[in-house]
Image (cartoon, rainbow, N blue to C red):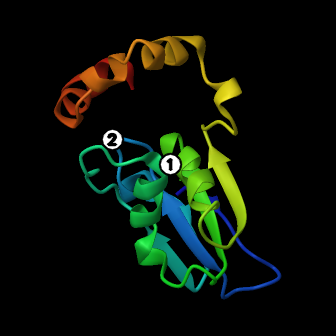
Amino acid sequence: MENDCILTSHKNKDMNLALLPGLGFDHRIFANLQLPLANVLHLNWIDPLSDESIQAYAKRFSLPLGDPAEPWTLIGHSFGGMMAQEIARHRRVDQIILLSSIKSAKENAPVFRTMARLHLHRLFTKKMTIKTFALWA
């Protein structure tokens, strides 16, 4: 395919690579990536527990990566990139590649900071996000 992206590692063909989609997405967002690496893992979202902190969620979300001492490269799209950074606080991560994501809260758009301060993000359920996807995507 002409729009496919190829990611290769010249140093280690056996690197561990985890792909984290953005919220509302799953592994299919990475369908056009050609990843000729031995160990590719797609992490799909799991439902958060009630009152679960983002730190606890990141630990639980990263359980499929196995041993926390084993090195991984994480590719995170949108909120998946922010989650990748949180995962890196709890386990060995050699590198993080961000796609349409931010490195810190300072880079977050003012509208999202305002929504967080007013707790408006609680209005955006998974069901509503899917129903309105055509409007904002």
Residue sitting at x 44%, y 44%: 22
Neighbour tally class for label 1: few under 14, some 14-19, many 20 plus, Cα within 10 Å: many
Q: Is residue 3 visible?
A: no
Residue sitting at x 57%, y 48%: 81
- Residue type, mark 2 in image: Gly
Question: In the image, is residue 121 above or below residue 67?
Answer: above
Left or right position of 105 against 111: right
Element under label 1?
A: helix
Neighbour tally class for label 2: few under 14, some 14-19, many 20 plus, Cα within 10 Å: some
Residue 91, picture quadrant:
bottom right
Q: Which residue is mark 1?
A: 80
Residue sitting at x 71%, y 72%: 8
How far across and how far down the image is residue 125, in percent? 23, 31
Question: In the image, is residue 117 above or below residue 134?
Answer: above
How far across and how far down the image is residue 104, in percent? 68, 35
Question: In the image, is residue 53 above or below residue 10?
Answer: above
User: In front here: 6 or 102?
Assistant: 102
Q: Which residue is mark 2?
A: 24
Q: Of the residues under marks 1 and 2, which one precedes in the sequence?
A: 2
Q: Is residue 126 visible?
A: yes
Q: How many marks?
A: 2
